[in-house]
Image (cartoon, helix red, strand yellow):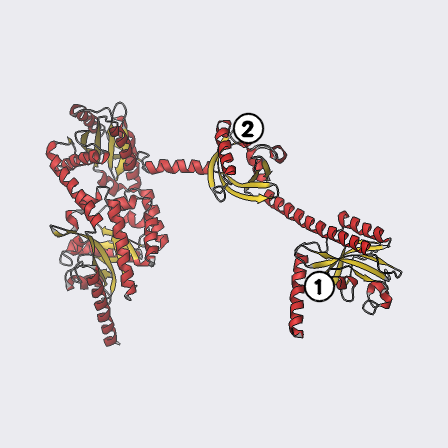
Amino acid sequence: MTRVAALQTDETVERRRQASLAAFEIGGTEPEDRFDDIARLAAELFQAPIALVSLVEDDRQWFKAHHGVGACQAPRAGSFCGETIRGDEVFCVEDARADPRFAASPLVTGEPFARFYVGAPLIASDGYRLGALCVLDTAPRRRPSQARRRALSRLAAMVVRQMELRRTEFVRSTVTEFADATALTLLSLDGQGRIAFVNAAASALFGYGAREMIGQPVDLIIPERLRAAHGAGFGRAIASNHPRLAGRTVEVTALKRDGTEFPVEMTLSVWHGERGIGIGAIIRDITERRERDARLLRRASQDTLTGLLNRSALEDEIGAWLKAGEAAGVLVADLDGFKEINDSLGYEVGDALLQAVAVRLPKALDGSVVSARLGGDTFALFLPQVRDAVAAGAATARVMEAFALPFEIDGHVCQLGVSVGAALAPEHGRDAEELLASADFALHRVKKAGGGMARLFEPAMRSHSLARRVLRDELLGALRNGDLRLHYQPQVSLADGSTVGMEALIRWQHPVRGLVLPGAFLPAVETSTLALPVGWWVLDEACRQMALWRDAGHGDVRMAINLFPGQFRDRDLVRRIDEALRRWSLDPARLEIEVTESIALHDDDSSHLRLRQLRELGVRVALDDFGTGYASLSTLQRFALTTLKIDRSFVRDFPANRHDAAITRAMIHLGNDLDLETVAEGIETVQQETALRALGCQVGQGFLYGRAMPGEAALAWIAAQAAECESRRRAAG
């Protein structure tokens, strides 16, 4: 080995030695009896006046114990102990003045004027020599006997054990202080199920002092009725070497000192120590979380505006009743005149009116009644006591009478009418969905006839109902067999003709009827349980297609998809959209979700929340068919939107029809003032395009640019349009 390499090796070893010493965190600390006693014992062993516990640092030797001298440190250079740590054996100097290595040492030339030195290295468990236990005399001496040298080495080993014990105590003390300082509740058990440790938070949580808990069986904090089961489970876990405990989080019922039971969540850890198995738990009081979950569960089953059940909860109630084989009736009521009141007096009055209806409706009927708001201004009443057409007729009559008197809302007198559809189980439906659908069909007939009356579902309507069921079954098969398709209609910038995006439109490739347009089957999807699976398929397929366009170099083209009402009400909407975007590695800003006013206003609070969450995700939100619904201005003010889609009905005769032109102009100006992108649907002529561009409309969609087309054709269209735009730019440049 070269001299340089040897020096580098020595430096590395020295750095590691000093790191080993530093890990004891002992340098510069106050004197301690345990080290002073060993130093005194060493001095007595050699009948010498001076003994030191010397720790050799970088440039000094520091004395943890110094018997017979006042100094607590000395330079390392030329020191006795610096030489001692070079080997594992006891080091001895008989006369320091006669030894050229130490003749100039401060301990020799000054106090204590040492002449004799004997030292045993302090060897840590990792093998590094940290310092020395040494004895000094002011007169020269002969080399000590081997027996005395061995005794000094044993005393040095005692010093090291005390250092290690001190470090262990320090760690335990630090852990205990941390455990008491943390807000987390910490508790540990031994292998017999006794409490071995609790921190201050645990004492406060359970109401006991730490001394009262330690050593007690864990049954102390377990309700008596649960102790046998808990003890059996604990015993099985220990007997099976507890492989399932580590890392588990469990919820159990715990007991406070005052007898209060409360739910806790415990995250468990397991270890093997000198005393056997140890089991630790981080405990969280989850009382508030349980209460919050209960509130959320109630909210999940309630309509947030009225406090009545929502459709899902109503279907559960009806389903449970019908499963028992019981007969019953259901009424579905639609408010006549509500739209006009809501439109003229505003949504706050409209909401208060719906709340008043929710109170009056159930009171109109005697006996047990389950009330629900299905959405918008549609309510349902489930009547377990109604078993036949006569009873159903009497119930509907009382509901009609309930609307004879007006409602007074915030100083406004509001007169409502009501249309009612009724159905009976089991003859009109053997499950909740079918029974409600039958009542809906009866209500639909009432509305077609002008409203303001009631009608019971009749056998003549059954064929229509059966046809819808057959259609629904066929659609389920189409979804499973991959017969549903997405076609894409271009959305074009009116400024330069570039492709802004594509709207995904669903088609059904029927094995017999060929390509079926959405008008023939979407109503059946929207009003059935197919809405969610079909809607999520549309989302994923559209994202897949968008990824293909991106990979082909057209990542700036966005995709617009329409939501079913059921999707918008689904609590997983935002999560599912986020997962689809992540699955296909897409920029959220390239996806636009289209919602109609009727969907957005279905449930005001949750609608506002979902739209805000979509915007926070980065997804664009378009209000579709703007101008065809009600409360449009309030919708724009309250909901997080990026885009306004002008319905094709206003574009069809534009600009020739002065009435449509005035409305379209107002909508475009309104969108621009609110920093919303405006998209005009149904553009078929250059004249329409030119007029809309002049008004400030940014994006156009319609047959002028292209019909909805399959994915491959859409990609070719995008590429051709991009090439054409580039050609125009070059020609202009």
Q: Foreground residue, 387 or 31?
A: 31
Tell me residue 683's x, y (percent).
17, 59
Residue name at image x 62 percent, y 45 percent: 177
Q: Is residue 620 visible?
A: yes
Q: Identify the residue position indicated by label 2 in the image.
A: 258
Residue toward you, 22 or 645:
22
Instruction: Reply above or below: 393 against 521.
Output: above
Q: Amino acid at mark 2?
A: Asp
The percent coordinates of residue 235 (x first, y second) are 51, 34
Q: Is the Cβ of the residue at disc 2 closer than 8 Å to that at disc 1?
A: no
The number of discs equals 2
Sequence order check, earlier mark of 2 and 1: 1
The image quadrant where one finds the C terminus is bottom left
Residue at the extreme front = 146
Q: Position of residue 476 (x, y in %)?
A: 20, 45
Asked if residue 353 is positioned above or below residue 658 in the image, the reply reads above
- 424 displayed left or right of 18: left
Residue 65 seen anywhere in this rendered image of the structure:
no
Which mark is on residue 58?
1
Left or right of 359 in this view: 438: left
- Element type at mark 1: loop
Q: What amino acid type should be assigned to the residue bearing mark 1?
A: Asp
